[in-house]
Amino acid sequence: MIAPWKPTKEQLLAAEGKTVRDVIAPRSGYGITNVVMRATATADQLTREELRAGGRRLATKVRRYQPAFLAVLGLGAYRAAWERPKAVIGRQEELIGETVVWVLPNPSGLNAHYQAKDLALMFSELKAAVDRFNGQSNIRTSQSP
C-alpha cells in the first residue's frame, strides 16, 4: 500500500514564499527572513532584479506584520533592493509603513570592511534603539516613503 503524500509545514510555507522563521519569529517579538530566497556563496551572485524583487516582497511582509524595526544585513543588498544608492550604515530616514529601517554591515567573514569590534558597536547601536523604543511610546518619527 502506498501512503498518500502529505506536504510538510516547510513545503506549505515555501509555496507561499515563507520560511518557518517568517511565522515563528514574529510571535517572539522579532522576525528573521531573507531578501532573496536562494543561497549563494557570495552576494555578487545575486542580480539587481532579484534584489529589487526581494525588497518588494520583504516590504510587503513588513507592512503586513508591522514590526517596530527591520534590520537589513548588507549595505549593498539594501541599496540595490530598495534602490537607495546613497544609503549608509545605520538608521534610515525612510520608513516602511511604520517600521524603522536599520542597515548593518553583513557580518560574513567575506566582508573585510569591518572588524569584529566595529560590528559589535554597530549592532549594539541598533539594540540601544530597540531598548529605547521598548521604554517609550513612539520612536517612529520619520515619514513613510
Image: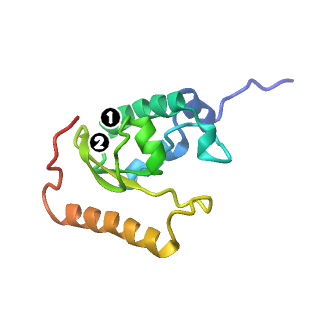
Q: Are marks 2 and 1 in contact (CB under 8 Å)?
A: yes
Q: Nearer the viewer, residue 41 or 21?
A: 41
- At x 44%, y 50%, the residue is 75
- At x 25%, y 42%, the residue is 95
Image-quadrant location for residue 2? top right
In the image: residue 113, left or right of residue 11: left
Q: Residues within 10 Å of mark 2 (few under 14, many from 20)?
A: some
Which of the image's four quarters has the N terminus?
Answer: top right
In the image: residue 29, left or right of residue 34: left
- At x 59%, y 36%, the residue is 46
Q: How is the image coloured?
A: rainbow
Judge whether 139 appears above or below 57 on screen.
below
Judge whether 102 appears above or below 23 on screen.
below
Q: Which residue is mark 1?
A: 64
Residue at the extreme bottom:
117
Position in image of residue 13 (x %, y %): 55, 33
Image-quadrant location for residue 91? bottom left
Q: Nearer the viewer, residue 82 or 86?
A: 86
Position in image of residue 71 (x %, y %): 38, 52
Tell me how far mark 2 sits from mark 1, CA to CA: 6 Å
Q: Secondary structure at mark 1?
A: helix
Q: Residues within 10 Å of mark 1 (few under 14, many from 20)?
A: few
Q: Which residue is mark 2?
A: 66
